[in-house]
Amino acid sequence: MPVRWRDLDAYNHVNNATMLTLLEEARTIAFWKVHPDDPSPQRPMAVVDAQANSATNTLISRQEAEYKVPIPYGHEPLDIQIWLSEIAAASVEVSYEVWNPVNSPKRILHTLARTTIVFVDTATGRPRRVSESERAAWQPFLGAPSRMRVDRQRRD
């Protein structure tokens, strides 16, 4: 994901609230189906039709982020690693690691985050179950959750 000039705050680094927007953009690219005429490359996790008039809404029920190192402005896009850390009955948890650009001489982990997404049937307004085709498409991308400081504190 590119860092835009407007993403910076008065301290000249990416604002914490803007980070959630960058994660949203990465998540949308990874999971949501695009229009059939879109020339984007194949995305194997993109199986949810969550556009404005679709049968499913995707709602955020929880988000947490741990900021490790401020992100300065740069011309190269950030490397956002994204995977599923849980597939539940009507929701999924998405985990993220935000790294500096891939071609950087030294790799720096900037942010860890997790988002829980609930799938809602637009006709009823009620949560809907994760379909078998969604579950099958996502299973290869299932891994351990981002290991955040709060997890270590809960264990102690």
Image (cartoon, rainbow, N blue to C red):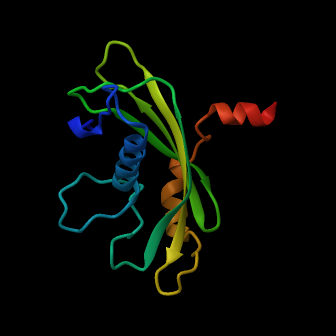
Q: Is residue 35 left or right of residue 48?
A: left
Number of marks in the rendered image: 0
Residue farthest to the top? 105
Q: Is residue 34 above or below residue 14?
A: below
Measured from the top left, where is residue 115 in percent x and y?
Answer: 53, 51
- Quarter of the image where one finds residue 149: top right
Q: Is residue 107 left or right of residue 63?
A: left
- What residue is drawn where x is 53% and y is 86%? 124
Residue farthest to the bottom? 123
Front-most of residues 147 and 60:
60
Front-most of residues 73 and 44:
73
Measured from the top left, where is residue 70 in percent x and y?
Answer: 41, 25
Measured from the top left, where is residue 86 in percent x and y?
Answer: 62, 52
Q: In which quadrant is the N terminus drawn?
A: top left
- What residue is drawn where x is 17% and y is 57%? 39
Q: Is residue 40 left or right of residue 65?
A: left
Residue farthest to the right? 156
- What residue is drawn where x is 53% and y is 81%? 125
- Quarter of the image where one finds residue 54: bottom left
Residue farthest to the front? 10
Q: Is residue 34 above or below residue 42?
A: below
Q: Is residue 103 left or right of residue 63?
A: left
- What residue is drawn where x is 46% and y is 81%? 122
- Quarter of the image where one finds residue 31: bottom left
Q: In which quadrant is the C terminus drawn?
A: top right
Measured from the top left, where is residue 142 in percent x and y?
Answer: 56, 48
